[in-house]
Image: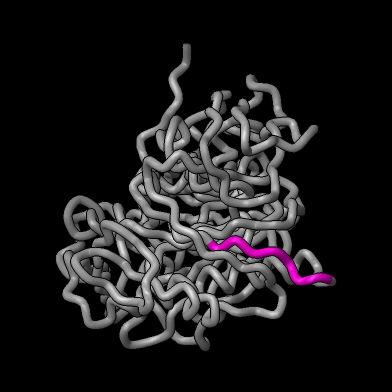
Amino acid sequence: MRLTKQYIDIKDVLFDSKTFIEDHVLHINKEELLEYIDDYRLRDVKIRIAHPGDSCRLSNVGDIVQPQYKVDGMTFPGVVDEIGSLGFGKTIFLRGVVVTEILEMPTSIGQFYDMTGPALEYVDSLADCIHVTIDAHPTEGVAKNDYFNAMCIASKKAAKYLAEAARDSVPDEEEEFTMKRDNLAELPRIAYVFQIFCHAPLTDSMYYGADGSMMMPIIIHPNEVLDGGLVCRNYYQANNADPTYWYQNHPMLQGLLKRHGKDINFVGCVMSNTPHEVKDKMRNAMMAANLIKHELKAEGVIITKEGGGHPQIDTALICDNCTALGVPPVLALKEFLSMSNASDEHVIFSTANADAMVSTGCRETVLFPKLDEVIGDTPFNDITFAFDIDPTNEFFHEPEGIRGAFSQLGVGDFSSEKI
């Protein structure tokens, strides 16, 4: 597979009488966009724009998506378009702008996003993005799951709509992703296990539109993820899952592909769920290790996860199974169980086989200041889930409460140091 990402840089976004891109400015016909994403399950839908540096807080944030449009195929197949293969051909991506959901139904673990202040230190390239927000209330009588599904679809449709405006634009940059098969014999064979956090519908991610909660380990082409094949649909435990933006810009996959044929032979990716039953964890770990060893014939493996303490068990089991098959593992994970755990409880597994671990950071408490504007009417939880936070005032919270922060997929340079 050979995927060409065509990037169009966006420097500003404004509303206009039609949707087009000129001089790196995205003009949006708000009424046309609202009509395109119209859904009977949503009411009082508002489209707003928030710029980096604005004294603005986004309250109760759902998914964050980079606008993309498949030139010669389906965009977000199974969610927006009909089912169709991804990972090859040309896809347009707008760079510097994202579509962000503002949820008007409370969730179990709410998220926020600040356009200025200390929150931006934790979100890497998202800090430079203009946010086109979709703020919608549920239609009367619509169940919570139906509302969240509607929001998930609306943001992906908006992402397609905006990127399609660049169909005739000259790309500012093109980036090619492929896995060549020649001149690799002398390079170490490295595989990657990409664990996603899927426990139930609406606490999951979708692969080609399919619920991932019952997924068994499968070998995928990395390009399929980078091309929009994996979409976040986690609304009840959003802090345990990466927004779609980080799937589209998956740092670990992109890094391995860029090093492929240079100093490593990246032999492939196994994607696996982290189920909540122990027997399912054991089965998935065994199957993932067998694919790594016998199908990909790897000589080393990198293992990452989403979420907190639950998926640490899956990570340890895959680590042990790979070691038993003679494939040494490297683990990358955040030292974090849940926002209600004590600060000295970071890792819940212990295995001698986990002798190469990369920390992607640990928990801390940060004061987030009062900002001038708040987009969204629904508050989110405090650290202990004991009460709702008033987003119009200053408050203490952990960075895990910021949507898009503290990804364990290789985003940024956060780590932990023993003191």
Which quadrant of the rendered structure holds the N terminus?
Answer: bottom left
Q: Residue 7's x, y, as percent?
A: 25, 66
Residue nearer the viewer, 388 or 392? 392
User: Of all residues shown, which one is farthest toward the front?
Assistant: 17
Q: Residue at x 80, y 32 (%)?
A: 386
Can residue 247 be seen in the rendering of this structure? no
Q: Position of residue 99 (x, y in %)?
A: 46, 62
**Does the magenta run of residues contain 194?**
no
Q: Indicate whether residue 135 is drawn in magenta.
A: yes
Based on the displayed image, in which of its 4 quarters is residue 315 positioned?
Answer: top right
Tell whether 148 sits left or right of 412.
Answer: right
Left or right: 86, with 88 as reference point: right
Residue visible at 67% across and 33% down in the picture: 339
Judged from this view, the residue extending furthest toward the top is: 419
In the image, is residue 168 above or below residue 48? below
- Viewer-closest of 385 and 31: 31
| Number of marks in picture | 0
Q: Residue furthest right?
A: 141
Q: Position of residue 94 (x, y in %)?
A: 32, 66
Kindly tell me whether residue 99 is visible in this rendering: yes
Its colouring scheme is one colour
Residue at image position (65%, 43%) is 313
43 with respect to 74 (left or right): right
Please determine whether, in this image, residue 359 is positioned above or below residue 74.
above
Q: Residue at x 55, y 47 (%)?
A: 58
Where residue 255 appears, as percent x and y from the top left, is 29, 52
Say whether residue 228 is left or right of residue 273: left
Magenta part, dominant SS? strand
Image quadrant in which you'd find residue 103: bottom right
Q: Which residues, given as a range, are shown in magenta?
A: 134-140
